[in-house]
Image (cartoon, rainbow, N blue to C red):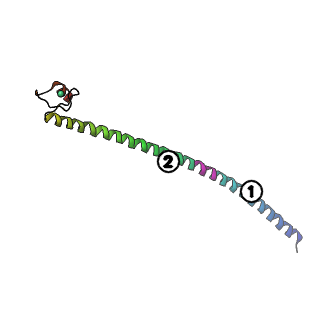
Amino acid sequence: MDKRKVFEQVSDIESQIGELYEQLEELKGNLADLLEENYRMSMENKHLRSYLDKQEIKRVKVDEKENSKANLPGEGFDNLARIYEEGFHICHMQFGSPRQDGDCLFCLELFD
Ligand SMILES: [Zn+2]
């Protein structure tokens, strides 16, 4: 048995183990970076989701406001006009009482 050759083989294996150990350290570093990035992104995702939820709630509230603005005044006005046509006051002074002297100037003012 060539003692020198065995010694070289042991030395080779030793340096291979050294390289493997360096690679292992590098992989550990990459893994730590990945875990950190993953954590950061999941936090960011969480914040973005709650931001989107808040925006959605705001949007729904704005829609509700706009719907009530768009529908109610028109409907209310139509109802008042109908009540006036049927011969009742819609002015603040005599609201709901029968109009006995024809047109009421206070009521008509509301139509302008
Ligand atoms: Zn009136």
Where residue 25 appears, as percent x and y from the top left, is 72, 55
Nearest the viewer among 13 and 81 is: 81
Front residue of 65/25: it is 65
Q: Could you tell me residue 89's position as x and y percent?
A: 17, 30
Tell me where residue 97 sits by quadrant. Answer: top left
45 to 88, vertically: above or below: below
Q: Quadrant location of ligand 1?
A: top left
Q: Say whether residue 71 is left or right of residue 63.
A: left
Mark nearer the viewer, 1 or 2: 2
In 3D space, how far apart are the residues under numbered discs 1 and 2 (Cα atoms)?
40 Å
Residue 13 place in picture, x, y as percent: 79, 65
* Tag 1 residue: 22
Q: Quadrant of the N terminus?
A: bottom right
Bounds of the magenta span? Answer: 35-40
The amino acid on which the numbered mark 2 sits, given as a three-letter code, is: Arg
Q: Which residue lies under the disc numbered 2? A: 49
Q: Are marks 1 and 2 in contact (CB under 8 Å)?
A: no
Residue at image position (30%, 37%) is: 69
Q: How many marks?
A: 2
The residue carrying pointer 2 sits among few (fewer than 14), some (14 to 19) or many (20 or more) residues within 10 Å by Cα, namely few
Q: Say what amino acid the circle numbered 1 marks.
A: Glu
Q: Is residue 14 magenta?
A: no
Where does residue 26 sit, x and y in percent of width and height? 70, 55
Circle nearer the N terminus (1, 2): 1
